[in-house]
Amino acid sequence: MIEAKNITFSSGGKSILRPVSLSLEKPEMVVILGPNGAGKSTLLQILAGLFEASSGTITYGGRDLASWDISELARQRSYLHQHNNVFGAFTVEDIIEMGRYPYFDMKPSKEDKALVEDAIRDMELGSRRKQVYQTLSGGEQQRIQFARAILQLQDPKEEKLTDKVLFLDEPLNNLDLHYQYSLMWQARQKIVEKGGMVIAVLHDINMAYQFADRIIILKEGNLVVDDSTEKALDADILSSIFEVDVRKVTLSEKEVFFSTRPLASGKQSAGNAAVSSNQFKI
Amino acid sequence: MKKRVRSIYWILSVLLITSCILSMGLGNVSIEIRQVFAILLKPLGISSSVEYTEIQENVFWVIRMPRVLFAVFAGVALAVSGVALQGIFRNPLVDSGLIGIASGASFFASAYIMLHSLVPFLLLGSVQLTMAFVAFIGAAVTAFLVYRISLFQGKINITMLILAGVALNAMCGSMTGLLTFFADDKQLRDLTFWTLGSLSGASWSTLWILIPFVVIPMVLLLRSTKALNAFALGENPAHFLGINIKRTKIIVLLCSTAMVGAVVAFAGVIGFVGLVIPHILRLIIGPNHQALMPLSALAGAVLLSLADLASRILLPPTEIPIGIITSLIGTPVLLIIILKQKRSLFV
């Protein structure tokens, strides 16, 4: 579906992405991991077509991304942003309904309305539907934006979402544990299970471990790992990339990652000079 | 909310018709309401028993009617451009005044008043039309400059926009002030007209020029209401929803400049309509542009026709400049809203 060849990006003389090549074909959940400033969001935005790479090519379904009509593309992929400020007192319903904008001209159809109802129910926003977006908590706002992004890919006539892509930029921000799992489940069930693809930037390694099919790790603009989740999430690799003492342990027959302290090496050491090991009693 | 929108439609429609009929009747030559109807019905071939003089009939058709219609279209232009500009800039403080359209137009018009003997061309042989054209160019130039200055990495930076607007407004204001300093009595009167606004120049010929400048942008903007709603989410989210960001911005900026430029060209600077009307309506019916845009048009028409009526009848036989009236009404209303909305204004 998405084919990226040697894409680079630099801004203000600073190289943010070194040549990155990716081939994203299968209906799967791909999680992009990496330290702060590694270029994860930039890669996500370029793959989604928000702006063009400095060099390299991206094709969607064999067609150059730039040749896609913007309204056609809107039915093909949706994007959940890290930060979402809304201007004006739009209600929860209003915002979610905007997810159907690529499908209707001035008035939503019956099918659109029905899909909006489903989205409100699935994201457990029924009691909030008439409330003004800004009056809600950060987590509720995040769920609303997620519902909108999912809705943008639904097709009432077609059960399958083949070749459709949901981009999620740090989707778990502000969410409590319940909704973190709810969001990841829904991304899998509503997109991946139906034949679509999810590409998400995450920070939570255990979430990635539980939900991702494939892991991409960036460091300083370089693609350092691109592999199946099992192979990619290795304690030693993670320790060296994130400069923490990552360990993999088995708890109730499930494997989880944990770490106790930053490793005193590289750029991370300076900011954490005051951290002493005895602060962590694990 | 739908019910509320519908009732506001009705209230504003009734208000508009009432204010138009009042405006047609009241003034130095008074025409009673039944006479207004009788005069209106006459061209349709319906004669009534109500009597009126030839002077009343002439005043009605030559002076009142075009002026009332001018107020209606000008009100639509100012309010709708305010809605659209606030929508794309995602800020309730933006209007045609802020981005320099009005002050640019009035500076160019003032310069033309002072220097028109030096300008070698006349549009269709009419000084008035040429001045309107010059004012329009002024509006376009300042709007474009403010827009260019506020561009940062291909996007409009709202802080830069406001600062650039303030700076260019101040510059245009001081240049207009400088011109005032050198003006003779006749020129001074003309300059005052521009800076404070008046619909006294309204006539059938100016009205026919104004109408396409209001109706065509209005149609284009009504077609952009969905895009403006998407802009509320931010430019990037709107892009992902399939909205052409660049095209929407160009449509809104061009339409607003055309609408307000044409109004200022014939009637001078009329402040606050574009700021206050959308703001009040947003509080009543919500931010959805599909309802906000047409209702603002109606409300703008009501406000400006009432303001023009007030400007004509408060201190007869002189006319108070309409810009003074709208600012006098607008400022306290705006202050009340800001005080009430202090916390939520900038969310």
Image: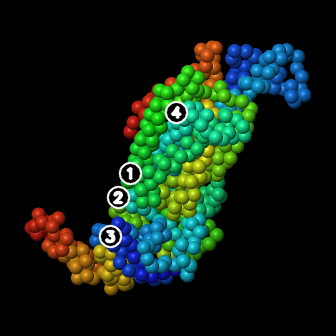
Q: Is residue B254 left or right of residue A51?
A: right
Q: Between residue B199 and residue A143, name the one nearer to us.
A: B199
Q: Indicate left or right for A206 with B188 as reference.
A: left
Against A185, residue B230 (above or below) is above
- Are dots 2 and 4 in contact, CB under 8 Å? no
- Residue A134 showing in the rendered view: no
Q: Residue at x 65, y 25 (%)?
A: B200
> Which element type, helix, strand or loop, lies under badge 3?
strand
State the residue position of label 1.
A137
Instruction: Reply above or below: B21 against B83.
Output: above
Q: Position of residue A11 (x, y in %)?
A: 37, 68
Locate residue B189, reporting x and y percent: 57, 23
Residue under pointer 2: A174
Q: List the residue tagged with mark 4.
A: B272
Q: Residue type at mark 1?
A: Ser
CA separation in Å, label 4 and label 3: 45 Å
Task: Give the alpha-carbon distance from disc 2 to disc 4, as whole Å.
Answer: 40 Å
Dot 3: within a 10 Å radius of its alpha carbon, few (fewer than 14), some, or many (20 or more) residues?
Answer: few
Contact between labelled residues 2 and 1, with CB atoms less than 8 Å apart: yes
Which mark, by number, is residue A14? 3
Instruction: Identify which residue, B270 or A109, lies in the foreground.
Output: B270
- Residue type at mark 4 is Phe
* Discs 2 and 4 share one subunit: no
